[in-house]
Image (spheres, coloured by chain):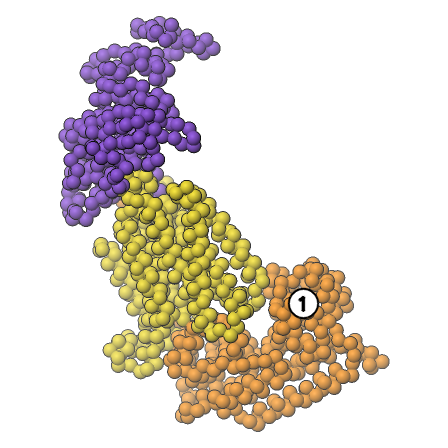
Chain colours: A orange, B yellow, C purple
Amino acid sequence: MLLFFSNTYLLKKHLAKTCLYLSYGIIILNLTACGPAAPAADHEGEDQPTTTTSANKIVSLSGTITELFFKLGMQDKLVGVDITSTYPEAARELPQLGHISQLNAESILALEPDLIVHESSSTGPSEVLTQLASSGIEVVEIETSHRLENPLEVLDQLNEHFEIPTGKRDILAQTIAANQASLTEYLSLIDGNPRVLFLYARGMGRLMVGGSATSAAQVIELAGGINAIQSFEDFEALTPEALVEASPDIILMFSSGLASLDGKEGLAQIPGMSATPAFQNDRIIAMDGLLLTGFGPRSSDAILELAKRFHSSALSQIAN
Amino acid sequence: MSSRSYLLLLLLVLSIGVGLLVGAYDMSWADLWGVITGDADDMQQFLVWEIRLPRLLLAALVGAGLAMSGAAIQGLFRNPLADPTIIGITSGAMLFAVIALSFLTTYLAEVTASLLQATISLFAFIGALLTSWLVYRIGNRYGQSQVASMILAGIAVAAFAGALSGYLIYKSDESQLRDITFWTLGSVSGASWMQLSIVGPIVLLGTWLIQRDARALNAILLGEREAAYLGFQVNAVKQRIIALTALVVGACISVTGLIGFVGLVIPHLLRLAWGTDYRSLLINSALLGASFLVIADNFSRTIVAPAELPIGILTALVGAPFFIWLLLRQQRKSLFI
Amino acid sequence: MIRVQDLSFKRGGKEILSKLNFQAAAGEISVILGKNGAGKSTVLNCLCGNFNDYEGTINWDGQDLKNFSLKEQAKRRAVLAQSMELSFQLSVYDVIEMGCYGQYDRFSSKERRQLIEEVANQFQLSSFLDRDFLSLSGGEKKRVLLAKCLIQLKVGAITEKRQYLLLDEPTAALDLEQQNLLLQFIKELVRKEGLGVIAVLHDLNLAAQLADQLILLKQGKVHTCGSPEQVLQPAIIQDVFDIDCLIQRHPSLDCPLITTLPYAERNSTFAPATGPTQGDRTPLTHPAAS
């Protein structure tokens, strides 16, 4: 009895002590856990005397906008990018701020940006952006569209906040116009529009198909295809029956999506997939997500390329 | 308050102090002192008063609310494994938040982000209250609430709400899915004085009112009849505690999303260390829970800076192994007795 | 004085108590006896305030019990329940202190400690105060709970003169030493504090030693009520408990001593291994048995 008594007493005392030590430990860890040094310091040397009208330190929370900055040679202005900024490779070297709905206000403040740009379509909670705006940083929301001219429209909106080199904008405009022209010409040569199904995959557990109002459907139509799904607008979960009913000639995927299924062998595991003409004729097209649906500066090239791949059989017929 | 409570209060003040000092933005003691005395540049002032302090206070409030509610529910159900999940609060809040996230973003695409956020919070809060009321009603068929039937009702309602949430998640698109996932991971980023002005009074008033039932909770530990023999209106106490818990937890998770393990681990830790007396357990749980979440948040915003780690991941990551360690330790001790 | 008048109680359409009448005076020990299912616990539950849907009246020192709130009842009586669940560690001190909860703010923590230590001393619990309640033996637990009851009554005594202690099978599952110790304490309480005690017991001999008044229940009715000498008659016991017994005078205590006898030959299929005539005991020929 006495043994028990002393034991519970000791247990309590010991635990209390453990708690205390643990708390101290946590505090000390806390003090040391200041995290990676703020990258702000790296950029201080490049600071130019600025005028109030032109921003010199910019945070981009959109892959498309980041890409535009690089395209126009304005990447020196970028001090931080979000998780969708994957192109070009150099964008990944910039401080990574995570997803737009999980931003850390303080990290962004530490980068001391003059301006933050993000796309209006992001649905993520942006209390952090509201906070940042109230700190005096200019937060610019850019309207985007699913058109080939989207990069130019974005540039025009950005131009209202800081100067965009007009020469480079004109070059981009010419490229887009040229691609547009060859696309129109190319599509006029061929008849017949393949039915294309956009398949979004994040492993076998998450398979979705793009409805008629998705950005993927826009891309498919621009490239001269028909979106194989017309009965709904959004992304919906894939069902074997719907797959067979859609009977796509071509399946379009993000390369990351195809990779998540372990390539074509994985694709064959999807019930109903083997019954589609696309699978039987081995017409699976995979492209980088940002390139395919980002409507950025490379978009017109990508869509021209896609149109050619869509109609490769028609093309060979013309050649014959 | 006992000396132990003062010790925990000191811990809370210290962890908030540390929280004010650390972060992606470099700040020294001198800078912080400058901010306090008003002798600092605008950026530092803004950082401390508008970003760090609201965030730390929100973490503290939510930690206090969750831990104290957990302790109260465990006492009320006389079950060491109970937490507000058991009366359906979490599943209800989750369901309604998912409803808000998947419908409002689709049908109210024009709403501004902060209005959307406020709507999600409101929905989660309503969901928490609604499901806990439902569970209480089901478990309380014949005037006297039966603990066992309430727990079963809680499981059933949670399963039902879980199925509905699951369906909505299944139907949701990528960005909604991401938002829902982040919501279930919890976060105190984006804390504002506005949020504090809503959550603060609810949590402070709620915890104060729960504390007033500390003696009743002690008596209920001996059994509901024992408590009645001592003169406590057990059913009234039960209704009060469930309503207050739903209110406090609902308010907390509506602004932060789901933050697990605080409500379970913190009261246990204190119980093992200092015993079960609810007169001190409730207040100590609040204080330690507040410190725990503040410390967890200090990590959440520094270890992967400039990005940030959802706080719910951290609390479970630290909480679960620590909890297992405690249990094993307790088992080993009792083997030698 | 607690007067139970025409107390009837139904559950699920079944009448458990029908028109019960008895009285229990302050300063006396009344023991309720009866077979399982006779309604003992139901009577006690009604007295404790657990059941409010009874018919008839329970007159509590001149007032109807139903007029008292739980808080009022807590000042006038304490209940030592048969079993209690506790799934958390709680110190003995904390458990005893719960007795003060009714009028917690009337006392400073120093006064409370003084009161608790005094009562703990009285029940030989002083060395137990810091221990975990769950680590105690059954008898020790009962004593702690009795101490809690006494504290509750002492605190209630500030406003109430007459107080009662309700005991539900206090000696169940206790060894003989602990049984004796507990009964000793209960008797002492009645003598010193002038409490009225109403207890449900199973053991006839303990009842005989303890009680001033015995209340025998049979099928929800009071069969016999009176002093142990009056009530403990072989014929009555046979009628209430369906057993044969021998009643003698306790050699050292001034009370009846009941010896139950093995089953008589009434039931031919279960012939006893040892006949009632074995040994040096004189068999009692009961009218009902012959």
Residue at (29% x, 75% y) in the render: B32
- Residue C94, image x and y in percent? 25, 43
Q: Position of residue B211 (x, y in %)?
A: 28, 53
Q: Is residue A77 left or right of residue B68?
A: right
* Relative height, residue B279 to residue A301 (above, below): above
Mark 1: amino acid = Ser
Residue projecting furthest to the right? A320
Query: Which residue of the protein is positioned furthest toward the bottom in this rendering?
Result: A167
Binning the other alpha carbons within 10 Å of mark 1 as few (below 14), some (14 to 19) or many (20 upward) gives few
Where residue C106 appears, as percent x and y from the top left, is 17, 47
Q: Quadrant of residue A111?
A: bottom left
In this rendering, is residue B170 above or below C172? below
Residue at (15% x, 42% y) in the render: C114
Above-or-below relation of A256 to B126: below
- The residue beneath circle 1 is A231
Q: Residue at x 47, y 62 (%)?
A: B97
What residue is drawn where x is 16% and y is 30%? C194
Left or right: where C53 falls relative to A94: left
| Nearer to us in this view, A117 or C12 | C12
Give the total of numbered labels.
1
Query: Could you tell me which quadrant the N terminus of chain A lies in?
Result: top left
Q: State left or right for residue A86 relative to residue C90.
A: right
Residue A132 visible somewhere in the drawing = yes
- Name the quarter where the C terminus of chain A is drawn: bottom right
**Chain letter of the residue carrying label 1:** A
Is residue C178 something that shows in the picture? no
Foreground pick, A131 / C190: C190
Label 1 element class: loop
Q: Position of residue C112 (x, y in %)?
A: 17, 44
